[in-house]
Image (cartoon, rainbow, N blue to C red):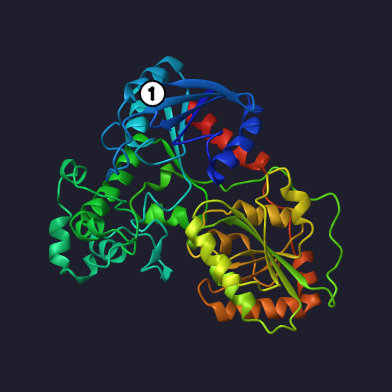
Amino acid sequence: MKAIQALARYFPDKCGGIQVNLNELLPQLRSHNIDIKIAAASNGSQKEDSYKHNDIEVYRYPVFPVPKTQPNHGQFPHGKFEYFANWLTSQKADIYHQHHWETYCGLPHLRLAKELGMSTVVTIHYPLPICQRTTLMFNGQQVCDGKIDVVRCSQCADTLSSKLPAAMVKTLSHLPMSVLSQLPLPTSAYLPASVDEELGRFVRPFVVPGYVTARQQSLLEMAKFADRIIAVCDWLYKALLINGIPEEKLVLCRYGIGYATQEKSPPAHEQSVPLKVVFLGRWDIYKGIDILVQAVKDLPAEIPIELIIHGIAQDERYRQTIFNLIDNDPRIRVEKQLTREELPKVMANYDILAVPSQWLETGPLVVLEAHALSLPVIGSNLGGIAELVRHGMDGWLVTANDTKAWTESLRLLATDANLLNKLRQGIKPVRTLNMQAAEIAAIYNKLQR
C-alpha cells in the first residue's frame, strides 16, 4: 500500500508538534507494509525539490507568489499548484493523508486526490478549521463548544463586529469569497482584533463574517472529499460532530510517543528540597508562561520552589515580556531550548511539568512525554490537557487564567511531598507510537477493502 502524507511545511524547516509526531510515527507505519512519501509546500519558492529525511522521500512543491489569506482554506489553488498536481498524479498512491487545512495545503489538494481516485484521510490537529479566533476560547476567556455561528463567532473574533447589529453581521456574511479574497488584510482575518494594525482593524468587521461562513462551508467541503476525518482528541471530535461532519466519517485517534517508560524511576521527592517545576514550549502568549511566572513570583519567599523555562523561539516580544516579569527573581531561570534527544535525560531532573496553556491544546505531546518519565503534570483544566491529566491522581488541574489558583496549587505541591509522590505513583503507562500507527494502518486497510 502506498500512502502520501501532505503538509504545509516539513523538516528541515521550522516545525511544530504535527511534524514531530509524524516524523516519529512514519517508521512505525512502514512496519505495517505501508510505503510512505511526503508532499510538503515550499512557500515562496518557484521550484520543486526532492530529498530524503530520516529515510523518507520528501517532495517540496512550490507555492508562488505567497498567497493571501483565503477564507476557505485554499478555495482557489495557489500559484504553481500545477507542480503539486502533476506530482500527485504521477504517484498513483492508494491513500492520500492530509495534515494541514490552510492555503498551502488545503481544499484544492484534497479535492484533487479524491478526483484521482485515492482514498482520502484528513487529520485535524488544531482548532483553526473550526474557530475564527483559532483558540476555541469564547471571547478569549471561556471554553467554546465549537459550534460555528456567524454572529457569535464574528463578535467573538472581532471587537468592532461585536458592536454591530446581528442583522448587519448576517448580511456581511454573504459577501462572495471571490470578493473577500481580494480585500486587504495586512495581518490576518484569523487573529483577534487586539493586533495593533490600523487598516486591519477597520477592514475586519466587513470580512470576518464572510470568513466565518466560509469556514463552515469549508468543513462541509472537507467532509465531501475526505473518506475519513481523524480527530486527535475528544473535544475536537465533538466540535467536528456538532458542525455537521458525518459521524461515520469521524475517527478519534490520539497521539502516541516513542518511549513508554524511563529506565529508572526518579527518587521520591523530599520535603526539604525545592520543588523543581519545568516548562517546555513555545514563547507564545497562548502557552501561558506569564501566568506561571506570576504565580511563582506571588509565592512567599520561604516556599521551596524553582521554575525552569526551556522555551522554543517564536514570539520575541513575548519572550522579552517574560524576562521583564521575572525581574531577577532567583527562583526562576530561563535555560536553553532542548532537542528531542536531550528531552528524556533533562526532564528526569525535575519534579513536575507545568502546562499553563490558555487555549485548547489537542495534545499536547509533552504531557505524554512527562508521564512516560514518571513526571506528574500541573496543567490548565482545558482541552487535551484535561483529557490526559487525571486531577489528584497523576497530576493537578488548575483554572487556566486564574493566577491565584496557580499560586495556591504550586504552594500545595511545594509543601506536601506526600502529594507529589502520590501523583507520581498514580501515573499509568502512556499511549505509544506503535498504538497510534496500528490504528492509522487499520483506517487505511479498511478504506482499501
Extreme residue toward the top, this view: 90
Q: Residue at x 52, y 49 (%)?
A: 232
> In this view of the protein, can residue 204 be seen by the observer?
yes
On screen, residue 9 versus residue 151, left or right, reads right
Q: Quadrant of the N terminus?
A: top right
The quarter holding residue 226 reads top left
Circle 1 sits in a helix, a strand or a loop, which is it?
helix
Q: Residue at x 81, y 76 (%)?
A: 418
> In this view of the protein, can residue 449 be seen by the observer?
no
Front-most of residues 373 and 284: 284
Up-down relation of residue 395 to residue 210 (above or below): below
Number of other residues with Cα within 10 Å of mark 1, as a class: few under 14, some 14 to 19, many 20 or more: many
Up-down relation of residue 394 to residue 26 (above or below): below
The quarter holding residue 307 reads bottom right
On screen, residue 250 versus residue 14, left or right, reads left
On screen, residue 443 versus residue 373, left or right, reads left
Q: Residue 229: x and y, percent?
A: 44, 42
The disc labelled 1 sits on which kind of residue? Phe
Q: Dot 1 corresponds to which residue?
A: 84
Q: Residue at x 63, y 77 (%)?
A: 297
Q: Residue 140: x and y, percent?
A: 40, 68
Front-most of residues 111 and 1: 111
Q: Residue 264: x and y, percent?
A: 86, 53
Front-most of residues 110 and 1: 110
Q: Residue 104: x and y, percent?
A: 37, 35
